[in-house]
Image (cartoon, coloured by chain):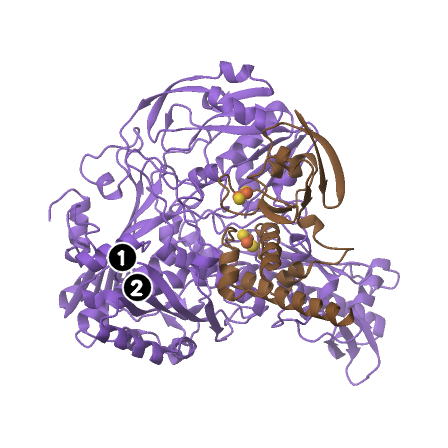
Amino acid sequence: MTAVEDAPATTAPEREVGKARRRKEDARLITGRTTWTDNMVLPGMLHLAVVRSPVAHAKITNVDVSAAREAPGVVAVLTGRDLADEQGSIPCAWPVTPDMVNPGHPSVAVDEVNHVGEAVAIVVGRSRTAAVDALELVDVDYEPLPVVLDMEQALAEQPDLCHDHLQSNQSFRFVFDAGEAGTGQDTEQAFAEADVVVSRRFVQQRLIPAFMEPRAVVVQPQGDNYTMWSSTQVPHILRLMLAMITGIPEHKLRVVAPDVGGGFGGKLQVTPEEVLSLLVARRLGKPVKWVETRSESLMSAHHGRDQIQYIDIAADREGNVKGLRCRILSDMGAYLRLVSPGVPVLGAFMYVGIYKFPAYRFDCQGVFTNKTPTDAYRGAGRPEATFAIERIMDELAVELGMDPLELRRKNWIKAEEFPFTTAAGLEYDSGDYDTATQQALQLLGYDELREEQRRRRESGDPVQLGIGFSTFTEMCGLAPSRVLGSLSYGAGGWEHASIRMLPTGKVEVVTGSTPHGQGHETAWSQLVADELGVPFEDVEVLHGDTSVSPRGLDTYGSRSLVVGGAAVVNAAQKVIAKARKVAAHLLEASEDDLDFTGGSFSVRGTPGTGVSIQEIALATFAAHNFPEGVEPSIDADATFDPVNFSFPHGTHICAMEVDTETGFVKIRKYACVDDVGTIVNPLIVEGQVHGGLAQGIAQALYEEAVYDDDGNLTTGTFVDYLVPSAADLPHFDTGNTVHAAPGNPIGAKGVGEAGCIASTPAVVNAALDAVRHLGVSDIRMPLTPERVWRAVHLGGDGGDRAPDRTNAQAVDSAQAASIAQGGDL
Amino acid sequence: MSQISVRVDGVDYVDEVEPRTLLVHYLREQLGKVGTVVGCDTSNCGACTVHLDGEAVKSCTVLAVQADGAEVTTIEGVGRDGALHPVQKAFHEMHGLQCGFCTPGMIMASIDLLADNADPSEDEVREGIEGNLCRCTGYQNIVRAVQAAAAEMGTAEMGTGAQA
Ligand code: FES
Ligand code: FES
């Protein structure tokens, strides 16, 4: 194994962007010298433990805390009633429609609980064990209310209500109609005139982000100032929201995200426990800590996905798609959290995928149920959209008797057609779907596998083989502020960076983009090394502390490099512009005559005359000899707000073995070729794709948050919620095509979510391709052996919905709407 | 309270612990060995893996009193004389970590795996670290890291053998 040693600082640095730099972050992480929030100990620190509701929906008639208060080591016990006047509501920053219903979300329940795991009281102890021991001494009386769990029933006529004080279980209805928006033709007409219409009902099961580091919060009050350390993806958003909720002025609050052990959207939140920790610290004037157990995390940290999708596709006999109609029910759970309603809306513009649909309609209802709230989980809305379109394209191919890839190719946007505005109104900037697909086919060894599939089919092998495709794109780089504003999102999408040139020539880069595993420290160093011509090692990246990095919008939506990295590059260019003035002064030359290469300014045509950026940094510090009227600083800030999303794309192909006797499925081979634009660090990009694939495959095969009829989460530990292990996942063959993103200073498109968005439908399509000839039409995720076995042995979708009204095949959106409204088929 | 004496990362400690205290909590809270972390409450994640008398254990499944008289090695003590252990180095080289929360446990489990099987196949590595969950990496680069470390350690041993 060759250790990658860094080039000596004296030689002109070779280009950093594109290099497989080993990560700077690793040094502390592989030696255990980490700063997880739970590591923090402060003098006099108290510990919080949360009493949680064991019932899904009930009135709280009495809370008796007297015994708990007397318990050894207990300092205080607080109920919802105690905090009712100061706790406000957990914010929802994305009112997707003007009439969206938000029931309000207390951090600790006052009169009513609406899901199992909701906070009911807080025990404050001198030690964590003292607080936890006293939890069971808190006596809460509940008067049960009807429990609403099923979205279709929740929207039926006269349903039980998730929230007593609301009129219905619908939070919002968001409609995008291309005909009305002027981005496409009339959808109803397209369907009326189509030769072929295929309709399906897909279920996006409920998932749990399951970041490995459980959430933790520490709050330190200092006079009227407060510092919060939290295992969060979004310290900047959190600070702003906490100020708005608690009335603590924003400038008196500092939020720090130290080392954070994964997020995947699950820590893109303002959590009840963060609010409660702050309130308790304020009330007691003492530092407090709250750390969750894994069971608490699975039960009460927000969940993801959970949609029912009724998808109709229209086409002519030759396979030209004519229209797409999507009706979505999206389970919000019991409350709206930070961006709960925005998740399906982020998907609304991606259902058309990479295809040239002339007509498109999206109609989504957000539904309340007595379950844990849902919110962002890796991909947020776009995996759902990609699943629906990539699954229905396969179903259409079956209906038309066409090869699924041929159907895709016939309808996808050709390389020469970019920029292309889709029926959903998005302008895709670039792409080459054909090249990515060709490469992926080769990587997979497609022809041999098809041949093997044929052999197994002919010989009636109990183990059948299938191949599934997903040719996808996603909208990434969440920004542009103006677009987010037009979608009623409560904040912008810009990102901020500043660069500080230290007297010794070392460089501090401050980024508003807060990492939790993505390798920002390494990638940003590479960017700055190239821009400023300084050694990679000389760059330090600072982040995650609102007092160090005052402006930022944090990390989610594959936005860090695309938006935050671009801000860093722009800041570096401003540093050079400032330094150029100083260089011109020192070299007694005109600015226009200076070249800047390899970290040095020199006068064009006069070799040997040079002044390095480090020398300029020192000269700026001394400021003894500075140009007249120029302030002695070459530091610079930049805020970047792109004009468009970025559109990474790729082709993912899964080859799947299905054992028809046992129902076991096994990924035989997985190949994908992604185009994420310019690659700053191929190691990091590959790692992001791998991790995304693991989560997307896990949705297809393993994971599901299951509630029983009473609303108890039955998958509340890692024994039941099946996060895959190394033995459950295959080797991935990954590749890239590179088309730099037009309009992005780096040319990057974003990679954080690609694998997760693309892989799920490829896996399900592969399994179906293996057994479709046995009469199987669909298998619900996750593809457990039981579900697969039933589908193979009973045919259709294995009777998945048979007891409940109908099979998916018979339902189209219009019928589904009537079912949802209580009508009969 | 019970008294225990343990040697942790080469240092001897004599401490009073509650009988119910888990080894992982003793390490983190009493010794400040916060390199070892807790990821679950059902012994499924392996984040807390340490070596107890040279064998990998999930330190959330061991009581501190059970470690009385034993030698414990954590992620903070696997390097020798300021140098990284070959497995630590391989995780860095092969990009076997992202957020790094699973990493201490993953490295400790991998060292143990290589002690039993000096040259594991890909499948053997995957099965060998099955008790350790990682949510970030998809495991492929962890597998690569373990195999790279095996190669490096094998070469180092052969080198030593030849000199002897
Ligand atoms: S914390 Fe020990 S196995 Fe999860
Ligand atoms: S690196 Fe994040 S859990 Fe493994």
Res A788 label: 1
- Chain in brown (letter): B
In the image, is the residue at mark 1 within 8 Å of ligand 2 by its beta carbon?
Answer: no
Query: Could you tell me residue A556's position as x and y percent?
Result: 50, 54
- Residue farthest front in this picture: B164
Mark sitting on residue A658: 2
For this rendering, which residue is in front, A328 or A471?
A471
Q: In front here: B43 or B70?
A: B70
Label 1 sits on a secondary structure element that is helix
Q: Residue at x 43, y 58 (%)?
A: A728
In the rendered structure, which amino acid carries the disc numbered 1?
Answer: Val
Residue A23 visible from this viewpoint:
no
Quadrant hosting residue B21: top right
Q: Is residue A189 left or right of residue A346?
A: left
Image quarter of residue A525: bottom right
Q: Residues within 10 Å of mark 1 (few under 14, many from 20)?
A: many
Residue A368 shown left or right of residue A262 in the figure: left
Q: Residue at x 53, y 41 (%)?
A: A215
Identity, as a three-letter code, of the amino acid under mark 2: Val
Which percent across, then down, holds residue A642?
51, 62
In the picture, the quarter occupied by the N terminus of chain A is bottom right
Q: Is residue A612 above or below residue B126?
A: below
Asked whether disc 2 touches disc 1, contact meaning CB atoms under 8 Å apart, the reply is: yes
Of labels 2 and 1, earlier in sequence is: 2
Kindly tell me whether residue A211 is visible in this rendering: yes
Q: Nearer the viewer, residue A708 or A774?
A: A774
Would residue A682 appear left or right of A121 to someone viewing this image? right
Eyeballing the image, is A212 above or below A145?
Answer: below
Q: Colour of chain A?
A: purple
